[in-house]
Amino acid sequence: LDRLPYFPEKAVEALSGAQLVVLAGALEPVSYFGYEGIPSLLAPPGTVEVLSTPEEDGAHALEVLADTLGAPGPPSPARPDDAGLPDGALTPRSVGRIVSALLPEHAVVSVEGGTCGYPFFTASSHAARHTTLTNTGGAIGQGLPAAVGAAIAAPGRKVVALQSDGSAQYTIQSLWTMAREQLPVVTLIASNRVYNVLRTELDRHGQSSPGPNAMALTSLDAPAFDWPSLARAYGVPGTRVETGEALRRALGRALAADGPQLIEMAL
């Protein structure tokens, strides 16, 4: 179970062989930006079938469809063995596997940023049952406020905010609200010290070798963010990890703690 790719060419390619695209509580997939020569509607013409609209109960619609087709019940997902989780230097893929494995039952995950967001979705089919909140495209600060809202709306559930260092800076003051209200939000910052999606867009528009000014404008270094210090300044305990083993330990402690926590994941 995966998300459609972010870039429209890849999304069109992913759907190109589809004979049927079923919408269950969703709108027809469209490109986040408009690109010259690329269609905004991503599904092949004539393949879209609406099972339920966003205003209707998509889960119930799928259950009715499964009963009508006589489909067998889903098998229980195999949870990853903690002993088999990756150690060593952190990568987006290892972060996705570790977060999915340690996610508590009925957690809410607010996902913003592509660095670890897509690897998390790929791995999350093995996670405990949870709810995911995400944006419809560009990462410009939605994730932390969504995590705050989720924690207030569902006080009995643990919330994990899976963020990137660039997008988190748009709404970093959300940490203060988490501290003030003592919300059980664990914020995970994927810290690679670069606004990588902007460099990818430069490459997609023929600038595969950007000059020093473009590199400087898309860098989140010089000075680098000190995320644990920023978190503590807002009243949230913070720590930095660089390996899979350290992330497992830190995330386990953060999920068991009361109130908000922040972990900077150095990639």
Image (cartoon, rainbow, N blue to C red):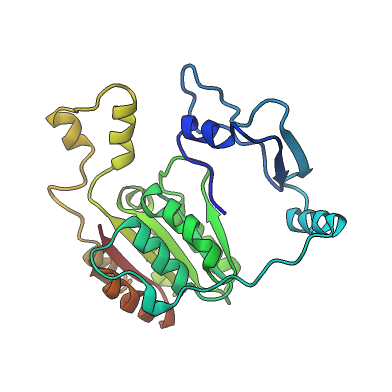
Task: Tell me what residue is drawn at x 46 percent, y 67 percent.
Answer: 100
Viewer-nearest residue: 266 or 208: 208
Q: Looking at the picture, how far across and down is residue 183, in whole percent? A: 47, 72
Q: Residue at x 28, y 74 (%)?
A: 245
| Image spot of residue 48 (x, y percent) | 72, 34
Q: In the displayed structure, does residue 237 sit left or right of residue 27?
A: left
Query: Residue 253 at what x, y percent from top left?
Result: 36, 81
Q: Quadrant of residue 72?
A: bottom right
Q: Which residue is at 33% across, 23% downward?
A: 205
| Above or below, comparing residue 202 to residue 75 in the picture | above
| The N terminus: image quadrant | bottom right
Horizontal side of residue 71 vs 96, given as left or right? right
| Count of marks placed on residues | 0
As rendered, which of 181 and 75 lies closer to the eye? 75
Q: Quadrant of residue 78?
A: bottom right
Q: Is residue 91 above or below residue 87?
A: above
Residue sitting farthest toward the right = 68
Is there any visible trace of residue 183 in the rendered image? no
Instruction: Answer whether residue 155 is visible to the viewer in this image.
Output: yes
Please state the horizontal and vertical placement of residue 19, each as a whole percent of the image.
70, 34
Q: Which residue lies furthest to the top in this view?
A: 37
Foreground pick, 160 / 98: 98
Residue at 19% over, 27% down: 209
Q: In which quadrant of the rendered image does the C terminus lie?
A: bottom left
Relative to residue 149, is residue 37 depicted above or below? Answer: above
| Residue 68 picture quarter | bottom right
